[in-house]
Image: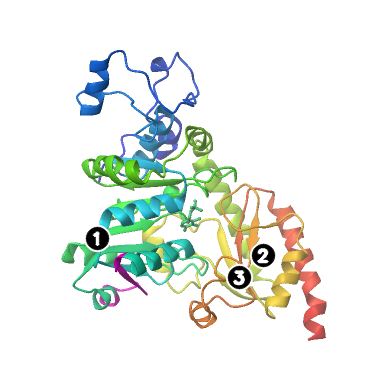
Amino acid sequence: MKKPEINMETAVIHKGYKSSLHHDSLATPLYQTSTFAFESAEEGENRFAGNCEGNIYSRLGNPTVRVLEERMAEIEYGEGALAFGSGMAAVSAVLIHLTKAGDHVLCSRGIYGCTFGLLEMMEEKYGITHNLVSMTTEQEIEQALRPETVCIYVETPINPTMEIVNLEAVVSVAKKHGLRVVVDNTFSSPYLQNPIQLGADFVLHSATKYLNGHGDVVGGILVGKDGAEMQKLRMTVQKDVGGIMSPFDAWLLLRGLKTLHVRMDRHISNAKTVLAFLKQEPLVKKIYYPFDENHPQVEIAKRQMRDGGGLISFEIEGGKKEAQAFMNALSLVKIAVSLGDAETLIQHPASMTHAVVPEPSREAMGITESLMRLSVGLEHTDDLISDLTKAFEAVKPKLQEA
Ligand SMILES: *Cc1c(COP(=O)(O)O)cnc(C)c1O
């Protein structure tokens, strides 16, 4: 783990960029180039041999992308970071890096649907097995280990029910058994949770979400505790599988990242206002929010997260018909998957993000037909609450009919 040199709020604006090296440009320039010209054949030889600094080809590194990577390493307590073309490219890179045929990956009880799909494919093609278990205590984790387990892969809070994985317990078991720990930190963002600081080896993000925050980029970031290992990853899996981030997407991300802390503060305060509104609404049956006093793992959440974040899941009276009617009655709140944007977004996990999960497993995970996930945006909360109020009014007659 590398201790940050500057505070996160400063790092997202300044880290890794020196304007005097770029014609005094205040903003990080966009190096929209695929390749780099060498002064001489010998210089090219030396760059390839690693005897001198300098760019070669944008799949191996690009100056705009590098600034983003340095910033992300700094704010996630890592010694190195790599940017990818999507969150899934970062997930697949770290899993390819850590596993070989016959290995086993232990996962938290819920993981992103495409991560699950990737693990299923790796099992089918390479015999790399996985299983999903609840991870609130060390005992639960210990019991699920197999002789061929090589890494523990977790998400916390888990989408969409906000179940919390106890990171301290995960790290403690992993240390005892020599396993690597990977945390998908997309839901919390580096502002709320820093898994490497808690002992994880890798942390990854779908940069599409809070890091960018403006809904106009698909990207991924992988941060590692060990700089030499990250350099190795750069020159193997990232270079040879090739799922790199484009310079333009890195440029947009640098722009979005500068306001991460400001945006997160407002996402959180808006979410808490909406949470209080939902709690007094009689049609709301259940609410899931990590820092809600009724959350079963609120103590663990408060130990490892700085605050509860901008996502709220809730169940209303009725079933799928009522949930869909509720969503259709909204106008300001947009019906869309993804999260962490300025716009407030709502989605229906049972028919959207988790539609591929068989119904019995879905029910076991708490994903009922009337559960919706709200990504609270940056609008004025009065406007959000009046939109939500209108939608609840629209559902009431439907429930009376039934
Ligand atoms: C969106 C998401 C991903 C995948 O990221 P993409 O950028 O869409 O490839 C992975 N994990 C979590 C938790 C996500 O929300």
Which of the two marks, 2 or 3, is nearer to us in this view?
3
> Which residue, given by chain and number where applicable, does mark 3 sit on?
314
Which of the two marks, 3 or 1, is nearer to us in this view?
1
> Which residue, given by chain and number where applicable, does mark 1 sit on?
100
> Which residue, given by chain and number where applicable, does mark 2 sit on?
277
Q: Which of these two is toward me, 87 or 78?
A: 87
* Residue at 51% in and 70% down: 161
Q: Which of these two is toward me, 228 or 55?
A: 55
Callout 2 environment at 10 Å: few (<14), some (14 to 19), or many (20+)? Answer: few
Height in image: 335 above or below 14?
below
Q: Where is residue 218 in the image (x, y as percent from the top left)?
A: 52, 46
What amino acid is at disc 3? Phe
Answer yes or no: disc 2 within 8 Å of ligand 1. Answer: no
**Disc 2 element:** helix
Q: Are marks 2 and 1 in contact (CB under 8 Å)?
A: no
Q: Considering only order in the chain, which callout, 1 or 3, is on the residue closer to the N terminus?
A: 1
Q: Position of residue 322 (x, y in %)?
A: 73, 75
Between the C-alphas of marks 2 and 1, the distance is: 49 Å
Q: Where is residue 180 in the image (x, y as percent from the top left)?
A: 24, 59
Q: Do the residues labelled 3 and 1 touch (CB within 8 Å)?
A: no
Q: Which of these two is toward me, 284 or 221?
A: 221
Between the C-alphas of marks 2 and 3, the distance is: 12 Å
- Residue range highlighted in magenta: 126-140
**For residue 301, which quarter of the picture?**
bottom left
What amino acid is at disc 1? Lys
Residue 199 visible in the snapshot: no
Q: Position of residue 116 (x, y in %)?
A: 43, 66
